[in-house]
Image: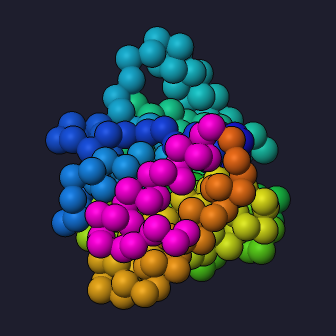
Amino acid sequence: MTTPYFGIVTDYGNATGWTADDDPCHRLIMHTFPTRVKIMLAVIAAGGFTHACASEDPIEDQLVYAYELFLLENPSDPLSAELWQKLGNIYLHQGHYDDARKAYGNVIRLAVESPDHDSPERLAAELGIGLSLSAERRFDEAVVQLRKAADNASSADVSKNMISVYRELTSIGLRTDDYVLSFEYASHAQKIYKTLGYLNDEADMLLVMGVSSAQQGNMQQARELLKKSFHILTEIDNATSIEQASRVVKIANEFGIDSSAW
């Protein structure tokens, strides 16, 4: 299921994204547990996040020129916040992270200055800044920025950009071996997915919570969370979910968790 948010689209129903390698344009998801588990979780954690690799798309370059020209000539136009947001998204996609942060900063400035620019737009910009920092592997700064975004969000944002903030914080936790962080925000995301009825995504977050628990030595909690993930997937009962359920069992076995009675 594709979930849009101000200018950036994430596909939460299909875990696609970066592989775990050394390319600075790719997400780096490295763990201390076995390689097979790393590969499986890389797909989960990277799913649904904006691709920040450099782009040579001439259409994007034309849009950047048009947006910049309009904003230069019409700095107070009611459309300026939306265009700054779009410009920031393009810069993020192209890997121009400093320019992206400047554009997102203008969105936040306009949100502060005018009551017409509400918190969802501000949250989208704060998310963009967090993603740009994360893409540069400035993880400590990214966590601070994304936590601030979460604190500033209103309840109306929960099903929109908020889920992306939680997923990015979850990803950072996995990528930096901070399993307290990954558990905390996977838990937040899991609750929203459960409310929305996104069962596959709820199962994915339970899997991350289970692995995070195991990495912290809490094997009983890990077993229960992985078991719950497995049961959700088997209840969906389609080819994709059955394959995902098999993956959960493999990960449980990697941690020495007996899944035979599930």
- Whether 259 is among the magenta residues is yes
Residue depicted at x 52% and y 72%: 261
Q: Is residue 56 above or below residue 154?
A: above
Q: How many marks?
A: 0
Furthest toward the top, the residue is: 58
Magenta span: predominant SS is helix
Residue depicted at x 19% and y 66%: 32
In the image shown, does 109 or 216 lie closer to the viewer?
A: 216
Please state if 186 lies on the left or on the right of 2 as rendered: left
| Residue 107 visible in the snapshot | yes
- Whether 119 is among the magenta residues is no
Residue range highlighted in magenta: 239-262
| Residue 82 visible in the snapshot | no
In the image shown, does 168 or 47 lie closer to the viewer?
A: 47
Picture quarter with the N terminus: top right
Where does residue 208 sit, x and y in percent of width and height? Answer: 45, 66
In the image shown, does 114 or 126 lie closer to the viewer?
A: 126
Picture quarter with the C terminus: bottom right
Please state if 52 lies on the left or on the right of 79 as rendered: left
- For residue 45, what is the image quadrant? bottom left
Residue depicted at x 38% and y 56%: 250
Where does residue 92 sit, x and y in percent of width and height? Answer: 44, 40
Q: Is residue 116 above or below residue 24?
A: below
Where does residue 107 sit, x and y in percent of width and height? Answer: 61, 53
Where does residue 187 sit, x and y in percent of width and height? Answer: 56, 76
- For residue 254, what is the image quadrant? bottom left
Residue depicted at x 52% and y 25%: 64
In the image shown, does 180 or 126 lie closer to the viewer?
A: 180
